[in-house]
Image (tube, grey):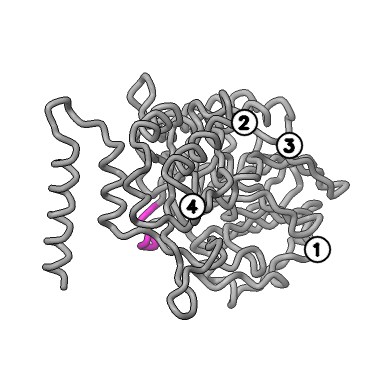
Amino acid sequence: MRIAHLSDVHLGYRAYSRTNEHGMNQREHDVLQAFGRALRAILRAAPDLVLITGDLFHSVRPPNSSLILAYRSLLEFQKNRQGAPLVIIAGNHETPRVAGSGCILALLTHIPGVQVIYDQIQMLEIASLDASLLCIPARGVYELERSLLQPNPRTRWNLLLLHGLLEGITSFALERPIDRQKIVRDEWDYIALGDWHIYTEVAPNALYAGATEFTSTNIWEEVKESKGWILYDAETRTHEFQKIRTRAVFDLTPIDATDLSAAELNEAIESRAEALGDALHGAIVRQRVWNLHPELRRQIDGELLRELKACALHYLLDLRAPRTGAGGRVAPNASDADGENRLTLIDEWRLFAQTYELPADIDRAAFIELGERYLREAEGREA
């Protein structure tokens, strides 16, 4: 049996307030495009079974634009597959807080061949494939401690689907990680995992497919990772990771501003961006600057930043103030690993206001000063 496994599509995801020619948020459109590429590639591969292991949608109530296009895409996809089995489990993003209040995924059960599990752990049997699928959606994770997870001895194939983070996958999980030994066992022909946005092989028969686009809260930790889906052969327990094209994301080499002049800092910002060449156009880009002294931040070239932001889909200049070590000395080469010392809210306002496009009759200096005054007044009220 050949299985196509994708996960964490996050349809309806929006970011950066940029729209395309049709008025749709550009990142929402990107996510839909990536999903379409995955579906077309899966059709060409012609698997026996398709699995989506959670977070097909980014929220409990996704935008109508993404909901309608997703339904149409899956309807056409299933027509081309002649209603072959497609199983979807719910992720945490599309699961309502109140149990029993329904789930947007239920709408997809009107499409031929689609089965959805969203409220609790449930065993599905697909007679045409002689297969049993033990499905653990996001809400079902809370039942795991009191649940006995066993394959069905009456079927040839036994699969386990889970949306959740296994222990050892990441140290930043908000919830307690899932006991790996309870899930990753050789008796399952395939363990299809979702929730982790990076393609990861936990065991030969246990895989995270990762996401199909860059939609996590910290895309920078994924910047070197490809997005895609998995084609798995249950007979041989082998797989191939199928990459799909996404929006380009770049995390540029950080700049240490400790000993730089204003001219040198602006040149460094410009040269790192120019090194991307044509790839800068429409990309998502972060440029970190470490050890930025207050007197230098005001001399960052506002016109240069406006040009970079106009060229990229999103250009983030991430500024970090100097860290002080023992005795008040500046700690050299402060980095993420050392802990972040970001600029104050007023500092960030100044940088934002330097690059914000203003009407011709607005004085930029007065605009910046007015914003600073409002922020100081707000700080005074909070104190």
Circle 3 is placed at which residue position?
48
Q: Quadrant of the N terminus?
A: top right
| Mark 2 / mark 4, whichever is N-terminal | 2
Question: How far apart are the two marked residues, 2 and 3, measured between alpha carbons?
Answer: 24 Å
Q: Does residue 243 sit above or below 188 in this rendering?
A: above
Circle 1 is placed at which residue position?
187
Circle 2 is placed at which residue position?
245
At 51% from the left and 32% from the top, the residue drawn is 283
Q: Is residue 84 visible?
A: yes
Considering the whole magenta stretch, tell me its main secondary structure.
Answer: loop
Q: Secondary structure at mark 4?
A: loop
Location of residue 354 by image quarter: top left
Circle 4 is placed at which residue position?
257
At 72% from the left and 36% from the top, the residue drawn is 242
Question: How far apart are the two marked residues, 2 and 4, measured between alpha carbons?
Answer: 35 Å
The amino acid beneath tag 2 is Arg
Q: Which residues are magenta?
A: 97-102
